[in-house]
Image (cartoon, rainbow, N blue to C red):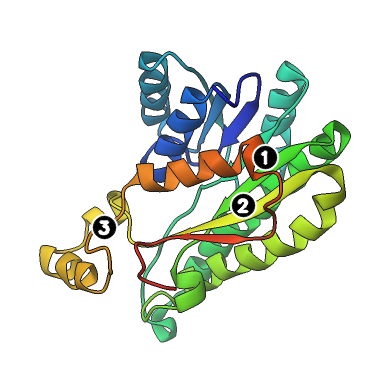
């Protein structure tokens, strides 16, 4: 229970990678706040799964794309606990399509949720973590942020922006013992990849040296490590969890 007493917030924690991360942090002793935007029942299910493992989970509803909502909700968490130790920026959406066909509204939605949402949450927690002189910020990016992918130019741009934000913020906050890192998953078994045809999934699997798609738990284990004291000399890094797809 190496995260005993720590307060953690996982955005987009109601399903997929976010749910696995919230469960893993709670299993390690943290109180895990599960952020969601629309699906309260899914967020409550994450809490039930945490409770079944003997952990503590709570839900927090806000749209990460709204700075006002983000500041208010994170402020409530901080006032309730007098601290916030771990932030996992996982909330994100994917809208695929060739760039020439991407609508301006889709671009704005992707950037607003994936990149601005990450900025909003980092902005809302930074002062508290600076006062604490301790903190962990883990931003969930993507393999396509570095490798690119046809049909995902807008999505890749939103995730690549997270990498630049991660490295810059790591430099800004290092003197206060706050570590900021990014985790870049490859193809993970989530709702997003489940919609792919079996043939498409097999084609992807053939490109992965470990010959399988990853699981949300593969990502959650890395996030839990980065949230721990043991990762206190790791900051500004991109940790790739992709089975060797991109090296």
Q: Which residue is mark 2?
A: 117
Q: Is residue 151 shown above or below 216?
A: below
Q: Earlier in the sequence, mark 3 or mark 2?
A: 2
* SS at circle 3: loop
Which residue is the site of mark 1?
Answer: 70
Considering every residue shown, the one lying at the far bottom of the view is 100
* Residue 109 x/y as whole percent: 52, 61
Please tell me whether mark 2 sits on a helix, a strand or a loop: helix
Query: Can residue 11 be seen by looking at this rendering?
Result: no
Residue 176 at x, y percent in the picture: 85, 44
> What residue is drawn where x is 51% and y is 63%?
110
Rendered image quadrant of residue 70: top right
Estimate the spatial distance between the alpha carbons at disc 2 and disc 1, rounded to whole Å: 9 Å
Within 10 Å of disc 2 (Cα), the crowding (few <14, some 14-19, many 20+) is many
* Tag 2–tag 1 contact (CB < 8 Å): yes
Quadrant where the N terminus is found in the figure: top right
Q: Residue at x 76, y 44 (%)?
A: 178
Can the viewer see residue 8 in this picture? Answer: yes
Residue at 61% from the left image edge and 20% from the top image edge: 4
What is the x, y in percent for residue 217? 36, 41
Mark 1 crowd level (few <14, some 14–19, many ≥20, 10 Å Cα):
many
Give the secondary structure at mark 1. helix
Relative height, residue 84 to residue 203 (above, below): above
Residue appearing at x 23%, y 59% in the figure: 212
Q: Is residue 178 left or right of residue 48?
A: right
In the drawing, does residue 26 fall left or right of residue 134? left
Quadrant where the C terminus is found in the figure: bottom left
The nearer-to-camera label among 3 and 1 is 3
Residue under pointer 3: 213
29 to the left or right of 126: left
Marks 3 and 1, the one that precedes in the sequence: 1
Mark 2 and mark 1 lie on one chain; the one further toward the N terminus is: 1
């Amino acid at each position: 229970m190496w995260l005993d007493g720590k307060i953690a917030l996982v955005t987009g924690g109601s399903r997929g990678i976010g749910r696995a991360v919230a469960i893993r942090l709670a299993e390690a002793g943290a109180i895990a706040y599960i952020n969601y935007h629309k699906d309260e029942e899914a967020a409550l299910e994450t809490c039930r799964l945490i409770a079944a493992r003997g952990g503590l989970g709570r839900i927090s509803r806000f749209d990460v794309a709204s700075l006002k909502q983000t500041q208010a909700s994170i402020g409530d968490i901080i006032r309730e606990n007098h601290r916030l130790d771990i932030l996992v920026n996982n909330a994100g959406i994917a809208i695929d399509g060739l760039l020439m066909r991407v609508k301006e509204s889709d671009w704005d939605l992707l950037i607003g949720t994936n990149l601005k949402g990450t900025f909003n949450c980092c902005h809302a927690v930074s002062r508290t973590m600076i006062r604490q002189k301790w903190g962990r910020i883990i931003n969930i990016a993507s393999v396509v942020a570095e490798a690119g992918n046809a049909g995902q130019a807008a999505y890749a741009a939103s995730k690549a922006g997270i990498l630049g934000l991660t490295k810059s913020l790591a430099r800004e906050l290092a003197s206060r013992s706050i570590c900021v890192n990014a985790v870049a998953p490859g193809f993970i078994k989530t709702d997003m990849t489940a919609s792919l045809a079996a043939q498409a999934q097999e084609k992807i699997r053939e490109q992965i040296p470990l010959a399988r798609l990853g699981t949300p738990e593969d990502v959650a284990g890395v996030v839990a490590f980065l949230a721990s004291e043991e990762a206190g000399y790791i900051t500004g890094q991109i940790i790739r969890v992709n089975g060797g797809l991109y090296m």
